[in-house]
Image (spheres, helix red, strand yellow):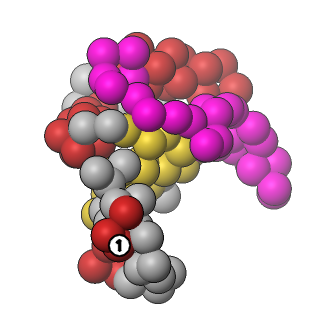
């Protein structure tokens, strides 16, 4: 069964805000069936040093869990106590490619725009 991969790139103004958002995301992830974390969530300064970015990748056993995390992130940056912490340009994408399925292991999903669901603030 395909493992949906969710990739985070959430911009914040300070490292402390990044930690706050990371704690919230980790709390949501704790309630999901996570397959693995190819890239652990971390907060780092951007290359230009003007802000910080929370990045990470998580793969899920359950497709609905990936979709739910995307919905939670969108709701979080739209309204609620963390909305003002997450800056414009932030994005979350869900990779929907079937290449994890044995029958589709040969599938080359690079550049296949239809294989991504993305939300951008």
Residue at (41%, 29%) from the top-left corner?
A: 34
Q: Position of residue 25 (x, y in %)?
A: 43, 25
Q: Is residue 100 magenta?
A: no
Label 1 element class: helix
Note whether residue 46 is visible: yes
Would you say residue 32 sits in the magenta stretch? yes
Q: Is residue 71 left or right of residue 97?
A: left
Q: Identify the residue at image location x=61%, y=32%.
A: 41
Q: In percent of the image, x 35 and y 72: which residue is there?
A: 104
**Against 1, is 34 above or below?**
above
* Above or below: residue 34 compared with residue 7: above
Residue at the left extreme? 64
Determine the main secondary structure of the stretch shown in magenta. Answer: strand
Write down the region rendered in magenta: 29-56
Q: Position of residue 66 (x, y in %)?
A: 29, 42
- 39, above or below 4, in the image: above
Question: Residue 35 at x, y = what percent?
Answer: 44, 34
What residue is shown with label 1?
Answer: 104
In this rendered view, identify the residue nearer to me: 118 or 30. 30
Choose top left, top right, bottom left or bottom right for residue 82: top left
Asked whether 104 or 108 is in front, the reply is: 104
Report crowding for label 1: few under 14, some 14 to 19, many 20 or more residues within 10 A (C-alpha). Answer: few
């Amino acid at each position: 069964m395909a493992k949906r991969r969710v990739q985070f790139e959430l911009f914040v103004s300070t490292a402390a805000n990044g930690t706050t958002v990371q704690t919230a995301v980790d709390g949501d992830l704790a309630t999901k069936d996570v397959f693995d974390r190819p890239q652990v969530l971390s907060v780092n300064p951007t290359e230009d040093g003007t802000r910080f970015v929370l990045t990470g990748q998580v793969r899920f056993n359950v497709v609905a869990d990936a979709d739910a995390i995307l919905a939670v992130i969108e709701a979080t940056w739209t309204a609620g106590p963390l909305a003002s912490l997450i800056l414009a340009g932030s994005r979350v994408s869900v990779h929907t490619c079937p290449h994890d399925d044995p029958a589709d292991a040969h599938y080359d999903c690079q550049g296949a725009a239809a294989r991504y669901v993305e939300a951008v603030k």
